[in-house]
Image (spheres, rainbow, N blue to C red):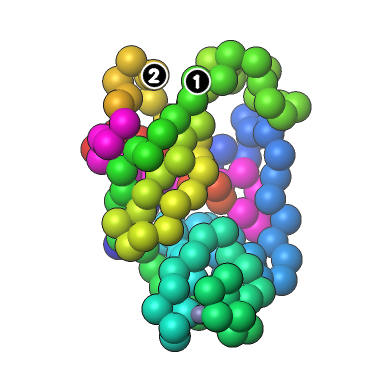
Amino acid sequence: MTGRVEDRREEWEGPVPVPTGATVPFWAGALEGELRYQACDCGHRQLYPRAVCTACGAEDPPFEASEGVGTIYTYTVCHVPGEPGFGDRVPYVVGAIDLAEGPRLLALLDADPDDLEIGATVGVRFWQVSDEAAIPVFVPE
Ligand SMILES: [Zn+2]
């Protein structure tokens, strides 16, 4: 399953991810509209990507593709920009999203805060912010 990738390179003023080390497959997948997490042979699943499994210590746990659907564990509405380049975006919403596959990730929620509630189902989209990275953004389903 893939999420739509929108080209935001012209307008994006926020931080731009630089793929390195264990994160390279994650960012490559995001550019193709695929949200990838690591699924270790020991059964542990993790995201953000790391060089080792946080449960068993195995190196380079393999990636799997998420269906791109999750639920809102919690969220906050940011009225003061937390990063340079977010000033024109306030108020914006950051959420902790529990993917159906298990891992929880922090991501922008592209929605009116009044339309959000904890436990609601969200789906992933991607904003391409550079030639080498797209960031996952979630919207209500
Ligand atoms: Zn493991």
Q: Residue at x 42, y 58 (%)?
A: 103
Q: Quadrant of the N terminus?
A: bottom left
- Residue 12 among magenta residues: no
Q: Local crowd at mark 2 within 10 Å, few (<14), some, or many (≥20)? A: some
How far from the left and from the top, in percent, is residue 64?
A: 42, 73
The yes-or-no answer for disc 2 within 8 Å of ligand 1 is no
Residue assigned mark 1? 77
* SS for callout 1: strand
Where are the magenta residues, as a range? Answer: 118-133
Dot 2 or dot 1, earlier in sequence: 1
Residue closest to the eye, 117 or 125? 117
Q: Which mark is residue 113?
A: 2
Callout 2: helix, strand or loop? Answer: helix
Residue beneath the point at 65% across and 15% down: 80
Tell me the CA gap for discs 2 and 1.
Answer: 7 Å
Q: Amino acid at mark 1?
A: Val
Who is closer to the viewer here, 33 or 137? 137
The kind of residue tagged 2 is: Pro
Q: Is residue 52 above or below residue 130?
A: below
| The magenta stretch spans residue 126 | yes
Q: Which mark is residue 129?
A: none
Where does the image place residue 81, in percent across and percent down from the top left? 66, 21
Q: Percent x, y for residue 130? A: 66, 48
Query: Which of the two residues, 80 or 130, is positioned nearer the viewer here?
Result: 80
Up the image or down, 23 lies above or below 100; here it is below
Could you say which quadrant of the image residue 14 lies in?
top right
The answer to whether mark 2 and mark 1 are in CB contact below 8 A is yes
